[in-house]
Amino acid sequence: MRKYILSLAVMLISAAGVQGQAQKVAFVNSQIVLDTLPEMDSVRATVQKHYNRLQQDLVDMESELEKAKAALDQSMSDGSTSAVRKELMQKSYQNKVVEYQNMQQVAEQELMAKQKEAMLPLTELVKKAIADVAKAKGYTMVMENANGVVLYNLNNTDDITGAVIKHMLTKPAGK
Protein backbone atom coordinates (compact mmCIF):
# COMPACT_ATOMS: atom_id res chain seq x y z
CA MET A 1 0.00 0.00 0.00
CA ARG A 2 2.84 2.32 0.85
CA LYS A 3 4.45 1.65 -2.58
CA TYR A 4 1.15 2.44 -4.28
CA ILE A 5 0.81 5.79 -2.48
CA LEU A 6 4.46 6.61 -3.15
CA SER A 7 4.15 5.84 -6.88
CA LEU A 8 0.93 7.88 -7.05
CA ALA A 9 2.68 10.83 -5.42
CA VAL A 10 5.58 10.57 -7.88
CA MET A 11 3.14 10.55 -10.81
CA LEU A 12 1.29 13.61 -9.50
CA ILE A 13 4.53 15.53 -8.96
CA SER A 14 5.71 14.60 -12.48
CA ALA A 15 2.41 15.71 -13.98
CA ALA A 16 2.56 18.99 -12.10
CA GLY A 17 6.08 19.55 -13.42
CA VAL A 18 4.94 19.06 -17.01
CA GLN A 19 2.01 21.43 -16.53
CA GLY A 20 4.31 23.95 -14.89
CA GLN A 21 6.37 24.35 -18.06
CA ALA A 22 5.63 27.59 -19.87
CA GLN A 23 3.62 27.32 -23.06
CA LYS A 24 4.71 29.63 -25.85
CA VAL A 25 1.59 30.39 -27.88
CA ALA A 26 1.43 32.02 -31.29
CA PHE A 27 -1.51 32.85 -33.49
CA VAL A 28 -2.00 32.85 -37.22
CA ASN A 29 -4.69 33.94 -39.64
CA SER A 30 -4.64 31.05 -42.08
CA GLN A 31 -7.25 32.71 -44.29
CA ILE A 32 -4.86 35.59 -44.96
CA VAL A 33 -2.12 33.06 -45.68
CA LEU A 34 -4.35 31.19 -48.13
CA ASP A 35 -5.54 34.37 -49.84
CA THR A 36 -1.93 35.47 -50.35
CA LEU A 37 -0.85 32.31 -52.14
CA PRO A 38 -0.77 32.31 -55.96
CA GLU A 39 -2.15 28.75 -55.97
CA MET A 40 -5.48 30.12 -54.69
CA ASP A 41 -6.19 31.50 -58.17
CA SER A 42 -6.24 27.96 -59.54
CA VAL A 43 -8.47 26.75 -56.68
CA ARG A 44 -10.87 29.66 -57.24
CA ALA A 45 -10.98 28.96 -60.98
CA THR A 46 -11.73 25.27 -60.39
CA VAL A 47 -14.53 26.05 -57.96
CA GLN A 48 -15.93 28.82 -60.20
CA LYS A 49 -16.01 26.48 -63.19
CA HIS A 50 -17.94 23.91 -61.16
CA TYR A 51 -20.27 26.63 -59.84
CA ASN A 52 -20.98 27.84 -63.39
CA ARG A 53 -21.93 24.32 -64.51
CA LEU A 54 -24.23 23.84 -61.51
CA GLN A 55 -25.75 27.27 -62.03
CA GLN A 56 -26.48 26.49 -65.69
CA ASP A 57 -28.20 23.24 -64.67
CA LEU A 58 -30.36 25.22 -62.24
CA VAL A 59 -31.19 27.85 -64.87
CA ASP A 60 -32.23 25.09 -67.28
CA MET A 61 -34.41 23.47 -64.64
CA GLU A 62 -35.92 26.85 -63.73
CA SER A 63 -36.82 27.37 -67.39
CA GLU A 64 -38.60 24.01 -67.44
CA LEU A 65 -40.40 24.97 -64.25
CA GLU A 66 -41.60 28.25 -65.76
CA LYS A 67 -42.93 26.43 -68.83
CA ALA A 68 -44.75 23.92 -66.63
CA LYS A 69 -46.25 26.79 -64.61
CA ALA A 70 -47.43 28.56 -67.76
CA ALA A 71 -49.02 25.34 -69.05
CA LEU A 72 -50.67 24.78 -65.68
CA ASP A 73 -52.02 28.34 -65.56
CA GLN A 74 -53.39 28.00 -69.08
CA SER A 75 -55.10 24.69 -68.33
CA MET A 76 -56.60 26.07 -65.11
CA SER A 77 -58.16 28.98 -66.98
CA ASP A 78 -59.29 26.80 -69.88
CA GLY A 79 -62.84 25.67 -69.30
CA SER A 80 -62.50 22.68 -71.60
CA THR A 81 -59.74 20.99 -69.54
CA SER A 82 -61.16 18.25 -67.35
CA ALA A 83 -60.78 18.38 -63.56
CA VAL A 84 -58.72 15.17 -63.64
CA ARG A 85 -56.33 16.66 -66.22
CA LYS A 86 -55.99 19.86 -64.15
CA GLU A 87 -55.22 17.84 -61.04
CA LEU A 88 -52.59 15.76 -62.87
CA MET A 89 -50.93 18.89 -64.26
CA GLN A 90 -50.94 20.53 -60.83
CA LYS A 91 -49.32 17.45 -59.23
CA SER A 92 -46.78 17.33 -62.04
CA TYR A 93 -45.92 20.99 -61.46
CA GLN A 94 -45.61 20.45 -57.69
CA ASN A 95 -43.28 17.52 -58.34
CA LYS A 96 -41.12 19.72 -60.58
CA VAL A 97 -40.97 22.37 -57.84
CA VAL A 98 -39.80 19.77 -55.31
CA GLU A 99 -37.30 18.42 -57.85
CA TYR A 100 -35.95 21.95 -58.40
CA GLN A 101 -35.62 22.57 -54.66
CA ASN A 102 -33.80 19.26 -54.23
CA MET A 103 -31.54 20.13 -57.13
CA GLN A 104 -30.66 23.43 -55.43
CA GLN A 105 -29.75 21.65 -52.19
CA VAL A 106 -27.68 19.01 -53.98
CA ALA A 107 -25.91 21.71 -56.00
CA GLU A 108 -25.02 23.62 -52.83
CA GLN A 109 -23.69 20.47 -51.15
CA GLU A 110 -21.79 19.50 -54.27
CA LEU A 111 -20.22 22.94 -54.52
CA MET A 112 -19.11 22.85 -50.88
CA ALA A 113 -17.62 19.38 -51.41
CA LYS A 114 -15.80 20.56 -54.55
CA GLN A 115 -14.43 23.58 -52.70
CA LYS A 116 -13.23 21.40 -49.83
CA GLU A 117 -11.64 18.94 -52.28
CA ALA A 118 -9.91 21.72 -54.20
CA MET A 119 -8.67 23.40 -51.01
CA LEU A 120 -7.41 20.27 -49.24
CA PRO A 121 -3.90 20.07 -50.77
CA LEU A 122 -3.30 23.78 -50.23
CA THR A 123 -4.69 23.65 -46.68
CA GLU A 124 -2.33 20.80 -45.86
CA LEU A 125 0.62 22.83 -47.19
CA VAL A 126 -0.42 25.79 -45.05
CA LYS A 127 -0.71 23.58 -41.95
CA LYS A 128 2.78 22.23 -42.59
CA ALA A 129 4.17 25.73 -43.08
CA ILE A 130 2.53 26.86 -39.84
CA ALA A 131 4.12 23.92 -38.02
CA ASP A 132 7.53 24.64 -39.59
CA VAL A 133 7.44 28.31 -38.58
CA ALA A 134 6.11 27.54 -35.10
CA LYS A 135 8.86 24.97 -34.48
CA ALA A 136 11.54 27.32 -35.81
CA LYS A 137 10.36 30.09 -33.48
CA GLY A 138 9.95 27.80 -30.47
CA TYR A 139 6.17 27.92 -30.15
CA THR A 140 4.43 25.00 -28.47
CA MET A 141 0.96 25.94 -29.68
CA VAL A 142 -0.55 27.96 -32.53
CA MET A 143 -4.10 29.30 -32.39
CA GLU A 144 -6.19 30.12 -35.46
CA ASN A 145 -7.23 33.76 -35.65
CA ALA A 146 -9.13 33.84 -38.97
CA ASN A 147 -12.36 34.61 -37.13
CA GLY A 148 -10.87 37.07 -34.65
CA VAL A 149 -10.61 34.50 -31.86
CA VAL A 150 -7.57 36.19 -30.33
CA LEU A 151 -9.14 39.14 -28.58
CA TYR A 152 -6.04 40.40 -26.82
CA ASN A 153 -2.35 39.72 -27.27
CA LEU A 154 0.29 41.56 -25.30
CA ASN A 155 2.99 40.72 -27.81
CA ASN A 156 2.22 41.13 -31.52
CA THR A 157 5.39 39.25 -32.37
CA ASP A 158 3.35 36.15 -31.54
CA ASP A 159 1.37 36.67 -34.77
CA ILE A 160 3.21 34.39 -37.18
CA THR A 161 0.90 35.04 -40.16
CA GLY A 162 3.54 37.09 -42.01
CA ALA A 163 6.28 34.57 -41.27
CA VAL A 164 4.12 31.73 -42.61
CA ILE A 165 3.37 33.70 -45.80
CA LYS A 166 7.07 34.42 -46.27
CA HIS A 167 7.91 30.75 -45.62
CA MET A 168 5.36 29.57 -48.18
CA LEU A 169 6.29 32.10 -50.86
CA THR A 170 10.00 31.36 -50.59
CA LYS A 171 9.50 27.59 -50.60
CA PRO A 172 8.80 25.78 -53.89
CA ALA A 173 5.13 24.75 -54.24
CA GLY A 174 4.27 21.29 -52.98
CA LYS A 175 7.33 21.03 -50.72
Image (tube, helix red, strand yellow):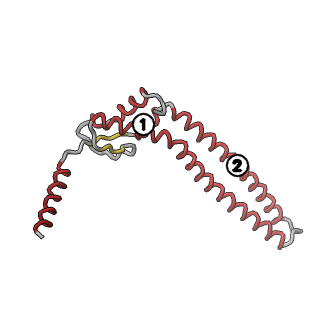
Q: Position of residue 147 (x, y in %)?
A: 39, 45
What residue is at 63 percent from the left and 54 percent from the top?
104
Residue annotated with mark 1: 32
> Dot 1 lies on which element?
helix
Amino acid, disc 1: Ile
- Cα separation between marks 1 and 2: 33 Å
Q: Position of residue 148 (x, y in %)?
A: 36, 44
Residue 33's place in the image compared with 3, above or below, is above
> Dot 2 lies on which element?
helix
Considering depth in this image, is 6 or 162 the residue closer to the camera? 6
User: Badge 2 local density, few (<14 within 10 Å), some, or many (20+)?
Assistant: some
Residue 108 shown left or right of residue 77 in the figure: left
Q: Residue furthest left?
A: 2
Amino acid, disc 2: Asp
Considering depth in this image, is 66 or 73 the residue closer to the camera? 66
Residue 2's place in the image compared with 59, above or below, is below
User: Which is nearer the N-term, disc 1 or disc 2?
Assistant: 1
Q: Position of residue 166 (x, y in %)?
A: 39, 29
Residue 90 shown left or right of residue 43 in the figure: right
Q: Residue furthest right?
A: 80
Disc number placed over residue 57 in the picture, else none = 2
Q: Residue furthest bottom?
A: 84
Residue 115 shown left or right of residue 90 in the figure: left
